[in-house]
């Protein structure tokens, strides 16, 4: 699934919050990640943006809670990284749904249709591809298969490699649940 990603400020009358926004193709992205069980109303982004009045966004619960955002609210996106003149580009969106994953910082993220994000950023390129597969994959084989699609890949990483901090925290938690002696001593 092609991805465009950027840190963008989400704002409303309650304030603003920096969030990682991921532009996705809804139908292909749903094949990669199972997000529906984490959506409050099980209403992910509309695949055909011509059937919507405003761009839709699905935001994480932490952002929604911090800014008191509800499903159906209108929010603004502001991209300070894309200042071309004296002001940053802005775009209004309708909150289609809210998700809560409770893993690391995912609830501070948001999803928007890739075409809307490309238009907003004035960036026609995909930033990267996300590929789903079984756990027994070979990076070089995946790279070869992707290049056969006409895509030149600079870097391939696994989800675990991209989220080392999550796995480190899980390892510490796992060790913390094992009953171990506090002190040990050698007896002669």
Image: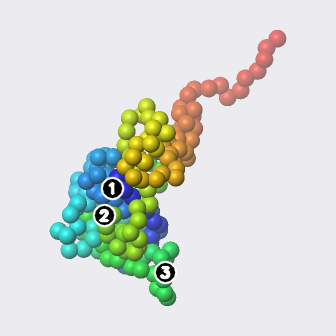
Q: Secondary structure at mark 3?
A: loop
Q: Secondary structure at mark 2?
A: strand
Please state which of the two labelled residues, at mark 3 or mark 1, is closer to the viewer: 3
Q: Which mark is residue 99?
A: 1
The answer to whether marks 3 and 2 mark residues whose Cβ atoms lie closer than 8 Å is no
Identify the residue under disc 2: 113
- Measured as percent of width and height from the top left, residue 25 is found at 30, 58
User: Within 10 angstroms of label 2, few (less than 14), some, or many (20 or more) residues?
Assistant: many
The image position of residue 115, as x and y in percent, is: 31, 67
Disc 3 designates what residue? 83
**Image quadrant for the C terminus?**
top right
Could you say where residue 60 lies in the image, as x and y percent from the top left? 37, 59
Residue name at image x 43 percent, y 31 percent: 136
Mark toward the start of the polypeptide (3 vs 2): 3
**CA gap, disc 3 and disc 1:** 30 Å
Q: Does 76 sit above or below residue 130? A: below
Task: Name the secondary structure under disc 1.
Answer: strand
Crowding at mark 1 (Cα within 10 Å: few <14, some 14-19, many 20+): many
């Amino acid at each position: 699934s092609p991805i465009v990603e950027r840190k963008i400020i989400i704002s409303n009358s309650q304030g603003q919050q920096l969030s990682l926004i991921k532009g996705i193709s809804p139908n292909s992205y749903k094949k990669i990640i199972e997000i529906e069980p984490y959506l409050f109303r099980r209403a992910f982004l509309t695949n055909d943006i011509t059937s919507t009045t405003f761009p839709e966004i699905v935001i994480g619960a932490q952002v929604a809670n911090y800014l008191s955002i509800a499903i159906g609210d209108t929010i603004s996106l502001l991209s300070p990284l894309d200042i071309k003149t004296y002001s940053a580009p802005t775009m209004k969106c309708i909150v289609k749904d809210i998700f809560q994953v409770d893993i690391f910082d995912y609830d501070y993220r948001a999803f928007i249709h890739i075409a809307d994000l490309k238009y907003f950023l004035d960036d026609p390129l995909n930033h990267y591809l996300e590929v789903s597969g079984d756990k027994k994959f070979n990076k070089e084989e995946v790279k070869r298969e992707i290049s056969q699609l006409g895509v030149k890949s600079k870097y391939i990483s696994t989800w675990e490699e991209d989220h080392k901090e999550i796995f480190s925290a899980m390892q510490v938690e796992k060790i913390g649940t094992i009953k171990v002696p506090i002190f040990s001593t050698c007896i002669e």
